[in-house]
Image (cartoon, helix red, strand yellow):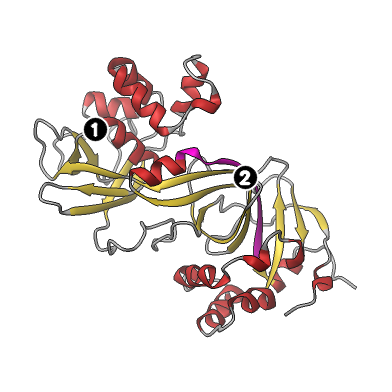
Amino acid sequence: MRQAGRAAACALSLIWAGSAMAETTFTLLSFDQLDGWAEDDHAAALTVFRNTCMDFDDPDWRALCGLAEDAADARAFFEMLFQPVLIEDGQEGLLTGYFEPELTGALQPDDRNRYPLYAMPEAPPEGGWPSRRQIEEDGVFAGQGLEIAWVDDPVDLYFLHVQGSGRIRLPGGQVIRVGYGGKNGYEYASIGVELVARGIYEPHEVSADVIRNWVRRNPEEGRELLWHNPSFVFFREVSEVPANLGPLGAMNRSITAGRSLAVDPAYVPLGAPVWMERGEDDRRLMVAQDTGSAIRGAQRADLFVGTGRAAGREAGRIRDPLRLVVLMPIQRAYALLPEPIE
């Protein structure tokens, strides 16, 4: 193991070359400065890291991936070959949660299942991409063979769009999985924030279940609320992913409940190990394996919780202070310094 003194903290104000980031501070830390590091299950994190590390093109990362396959001591592997780097952009850290929804639907529309999931069109209609309202109210893509399935609840479908992937349980028990296939190019607008802006709820009262129940109690206003978000997600079927594995993340690999994070790849390399300090007592080594349209900033992340309604309730409760520390290959971390350390 490396000596802790070798990783003396060094704060830098730099622009990360090749990115669109604002001025960013990099602080090199020691593993002793990661609260709870010694108590974590490093082997669990190493297993998740192995799931996506083969996708790195960079030679420094690929070398570490090769060593990961044969690592017998997970903690020693991370401590010997990585350098903890705190990356900050002046914004407070925030952790939220996300999950894989499970909806009820059918492969053909009927009186109950009336709300379609669309595959990505090859090209936008003449005049450009339509908004969510135009797609759902005007039926811009209806009857073009783009429907993957129809589901029974427009609110559950909306949250499927927010999460980006999910499972559709069909009559007879068959299940298909869908993943993100593209979007219409509009910026995401939070309907939870809109409910607060309208004075209907206080910020601490808003959750997915609260939104779901309000829309169902107020169907006409609820429909308009959903259309407040013009962003619309198209899907693709990914049923080849085994049911015992998580949904596909941004690296097109299955993600793992409790160990996978969605991050802003402008700051955190996808596939990198990331030390998460959430609130007062949740300390875990995670892997950055996903992204999200609302995840922007060096200290912003989304924790993948799991599949189904219970996971959705848990994810909806997560809104916690956060400190993220990225574990980078040692040579990459020290390359952030303006000049070699004496």
At 11% across and 37% down in the image, what residue appears?
109
Res 56 visible: no
Res 242 visible: yes
**Looking at the magenta stretch, what is its main secondary structure?**
strand
Helix, strand or loop at label 2? It is: loop
In the figure, 249 relative to 205: above or below?
A: below
Range covered by the magenta-colored residues: 316-327
In the figure, 259 relative to 7: above or below?
A: above
In this orientation, which residue lies closer to the viewer: 233 or 4? 4
Residue placed under numbered mark 2 in the picture: 297
At 68% across and 74% down in the image, what residue appears?
79
Where residue 153 is drawn, which disc sits there?
Answer: 1
Left or right: 102 as drawn, with respect to 56: left
In this orientation, which residue lies closer to the viewer: 112 or 330? 112
325 inside magenta stretch: yes
Q: Tell which tag, 2 or 1, sits nearer the viewer.
A: 1
At 67% across and 68% down in the image, what residue appears?
38
Quadrant where the image shows the C terminus: bottom right
Query: Picture coordinates of residue 242 (x, y %)?
Result: 28, 64
